[in-house]
Image (cartoon, rainbow, N blue to C red):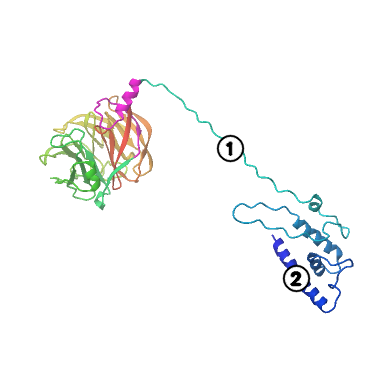
Amino acid sequence: GGVPELRAELAALAARLSRLESRERGAGGSGPRGAEPGGARDPPQVAAAALFPGESGHRCALLQWEGALSSRPRQRHFGGSSPARSPPRAAGAGRRCGGLPEPRSRRAGPAAAPRWEPQPLSYQELQSERSEVPVSRLLEETALGRPGKEDSGCGQLVWVGEPVVFGRADSIAGKYGVWMKDPEPAPPFTRDNTWRVDTVGTEVRQLFQYEEAEQLARGYPAKVHILPRPLESTGAVVYRGGLFFQPRRSRSVARYDLRGETITAEREIPGAGFHGQYPYSWGGYTDIDLAVDETGLWVIYSTDKARGAIVLSKLDPETLEIRRTWETNIRKRGVANSFLICGTLYTVSSYSAPNATINFAYDTATGTSRALSIPFENRFRYLSMLDYNPAERQLFAWDSFNMVTYPVRLSRA
C-alpha cells in the first residue's frame, strides 16, 4: 500500500539531485557529487545513493526492489478509467550487484496478464406435461367456481383467491362494518343493489343503499334507511328482501323489511351469549353472527351449555323460528370469523395475520368436523366481517375500512 508514496519520495529526491547537478555544472563541476566512475546514473540510482550513502548492499537491494515493482504486470481496467502506466525501469536493475541474488520476479520476466474468456452460458430446458381430465368433471368444477352461475349444486371449499377492493370507508365509523348483496332479492330490488352499515358507535341505525357496487365505490348512496332499533356488531345479512340483524344488547335476531321499512319479525335465540360473552377472537360484540348459503338462513353463536363452542341454528326467514340446531367442537373465541357454504361451516384462523388460513370445517350433513389449511389473505390486517354470497359465489369481507371480495372455488365432495 505504500508503493505510490515511496515512488513519489524517490521522484522528489531525484528532482532535487538534478537541480544540484545543474548548479554544479553551472559552477564548473564535472558531474554530480558521489557519481561512480563510468558515467552518470539514473535518477532512482542517485536517489538510492542519497538515501543509503556508503552502503552498497542496501543501495543494490533498493534498485532490485524498484526494478521488481516496475516489472509487475499491468492490471486490466474496465470502464472509463485508463490503466496506470508502470514507471521506467532503473538502469542496471537487471544485473546482479553486491552479492545479492536477483529477485525471482525479475528472473522470470514480466508475466502476461490473464486473458479473459467468458464462460459458456447454460440454459435450463423447459418441460411441459399434459394430463387428461374427464370433460364432465372439468365442467362441474368450472361451474361451481364461476360467480353468478345459476347452479344449485354444492361442493367443498378448496381455494380462496386474493381480495379485491370495492370501496373504502372515509370516517372512523367505518373502521368496522358490514356490506352485502341479496342473493335472492325481492322486487323492487335486484342483485345489483348493495347494502352497507358502518358499525362503530353506540347507536348504529344507518343502512346505506346503493344501486350497484360502482356507486358504493364512489361513496354516494341512493338512500339511507334509519333502522327502528340500533344493531349490534357486524353479523347482519340481507336475504329475500330483508335485513337480518341482532338488536343492540339482546340475544334476539330481527328482520327489517327493506321495502316496507319496518321490523316484521323478531325472535330470541335461547341461551345465546351476547354483548361480549362469546365473540370471535377479535371481539367487537360478535356473539351472534347471521349467515346465508345455498340452503338458507343461519345463525352462529354459542351458549353456556356449549361451553363456548360454536352452535349453529337453521332459521325460517319469515318467522325466524329455529328449525334445527347443531353443536360443534370448534371454540368460538379461538377463531376470527366464520361463514357457511352448502351447509358446511368454515372458520378463519386469524383476523390480523396477513397469511391466515381457513382452518376448520363442520359439515352439518354428517355432524363431523375436520381440520383444513386453505390460505386466506388479510391484506389490511383487521378482518371484522366475513360472509358468503351463494349467488355471487364470492366471500364478502370488511378489512380495516376496506370492503373487499374473495373469489372461491368449490369441488364435488
Q: Residue furthest bottom?
A: 27
Label 1 environment density (alpha carbons within 10 Å; few <14, some 14–19, many ≥20): few
User: Residue at position x 83%, y 64% from top?
Assistant: 59
Picture quadrant where residue 61 is located: bottom right
Q: Which residue is mark 2?
A: 15
Q: Which residues are magenta?
A: 135-162
Residue neighbourhood size for the residue with mark 2, other residues' Cα within 10 Å, grouped as few (<14), some (14–19), many (≥20): some
Residue 161 in magenta? yes
Q: Is residue 164 magenta?
A: no
Q: Quadrant of the C terminus?
A: top left
**Residue at point 86% right, 71% down?**
34
Nearer to the camera, 111 or 190: 111
Quarter of the N terminus within the rendering = bottom right
Task: Kindly tell me whether residue 259 is visible in this rendering.
Answer: yes
Q: Secondary structure at mark 2?
A: helix
Where residue 404 sits: x, y (%)? Answer: 29, 42
| Residue 225 percent location from the top left of the image | 14, 45
Q: Which mark is residue 103?
A: none
Q: Is residue 130 left or right of residue 228?
A: right
Q: Are marks 2 and 1 in contact (CB under 8 Å)?
A: no
Label 1 secondary element: loop
Q: State which quadrant residue 131 falls in.
A: top left
Residue 121, label in figure: 1
What separation in Å lies between label 2 and label 1 (alpha carbons)? 54 Å
Is 113 located above or below residue 191 in the figure? below
Closer to us: 357 or 72: 72
